[in-house]
Amino acid sequence: MEIKSRLLKQLDKDIAAAKSPVSAACLRARRAILLARHGALNEAREQLTVLHQLAFQHPHPEVGAWLHLAEGLMSYYTDFGSSAQEKIQRALSISRSIGQTEVEALAHAWLTQLAYVRHDLPAVLSHAAECLRVAAPEHRVARGRVHMVMGVCWQYAGQLEQALPWFQRARAYAAADGDDATISALMYNMAVMRTAQVRWKALSSTAAQAPELLLGVDSVKHYDTAVGAAVLAELTPLLRAQILAIQGEFQQAKALYEEHLPLAISRGLARLGSSLLSDLAWCRLNCDETEAAIQQAREAAVELDPLCDVDDRAATHTRLAQIFAAVGETATAAHHQECATAEWAEFARQQGQWGAALAASGLTADPLRR
């Protein structure tokens, strides 16, 4: 898929005009990072291999800092896991030691994101504050990434009004740079959080059908196709499947889960496995595949990771309670319902805790320029 990115074109111009081999190498590392963020991992790897060979022959700390950052993001986009942490932390250490503030700001921005994935709010706030302190106004990629993550944090806390200024500024930074990868990620993350909120309500039988959710997911897909972004290609179908299950389109949801869930789990999203497997079991049950649904439900119960996000644990237990109640296994259903009630209460407590901590942090979105 051809990448149609204004930021990529600008980087190519900057590389051609670079006044030194070191400057050119740093720009090429930035280009590889952008390719990874677009999902072009093979091309990014080829470019990084060349840069590593050059760095081995002519070592330079600034190039090293960029390469550690690039390798960290390659790890992140390869399996969406936590193996990126050490590499990005190394980039942060080197950049601090040589006063390379752009890499330092970017490292803090991505460590903010990784901390959110772990739901480590103190680390989120610490790295976000450092990024906003260090990043110059022209470091829009770093500032935009932090603004997006902070918006997601506020939305997770159930406070959309507080999230909106962060999302708006993130989009403005990305638009100013022509950073299509960030705009795609922003659209996806906002769609994920909106879907999660409707799903929470649906699991307690209070949700509307929310037809606009599918429009949001389709917008991500169409945008990615237009700009040549592939990094979310395996995730958006799963998001669509969740929405279809909410809306009672069980056959369509089941087909998407069956096609895309195994690969997603193999690529590092196992922490979401139990929640999505329980959703698939619910779809099977509603497609008259009772035996398969029961087997899938038992698998989801086994796969339930105590370390996964509390809302995913709550959703899993709720779905399992519904399934086992429907097939007459009342004791098992009662157990999962009891667990679900406790987890939803913990989630509400966590939302309040996050909202209070975010407010107490004093962090505010950069003002939008008129």
Image (cartoon, helix red, strand yellow):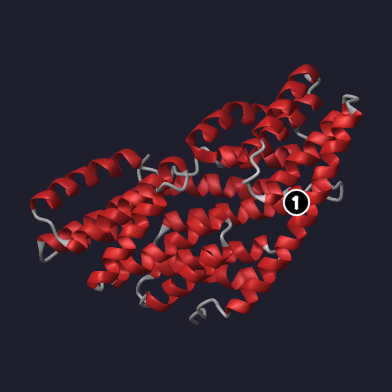
Quick one: label 1, few (<14), some, or many (20+) residues within 10 Å?
some
Determine which quarter of the picture holds residue 24.
Answer: bottom left
Please indicate whether residue 284 sits to the left or right of residue 217 in the image: right
Residue at image point 47% right, 45% down: 81
Please indicate whether residue 102 sits to the left or right of residue 297 in the image: left
Please indicate whether residue 270 sits to the left or right of residue 227 in the image: right
Between 289 and 326, which is closer to the camera in this rendering?
A: 326
Q: Position of residue 145 (x, y in %)?
A: 46, 63
Between 34 and 93, which is closer to the camera in this rendering?
A: 93
Please indicate whether residue 333 sits to the left or right of residue 52 in the image: right
Residue at image point 52% right, 65% down: 124
Q: Position of residue 195 (x, y in %)?
A: 69, 50
The answer to whether 224 is drawn above or below residue 166 in the figure is above
Q: Position of residue 131 (x, y in %)?
A: 42, 71
User: Regarding mark 1 in the picture, which secondary structure is present there?
Assistant: helix
User: What kind of residue is marked 1?
Assistant: Val
Residue at image point 63% right, 31% down: 257
Determine which quarter of the picture holds residue 134.
Answer: bottom left
Q: Is residue 34 visible?
A: no
The mark tally for this picture is 1
| Quadrant position of the N terminus in the picture | top left
Between 301 and 140, which is closer to the camera in this rendering?
A: 301
Residue at image point 45% right, 58% down: 182
Q: Position of residue 72 (x, y in %)?
A: 36, 51
Q: Which residue is mark 1?
A: 198
Q: Is residue 135 visible?
A: yes
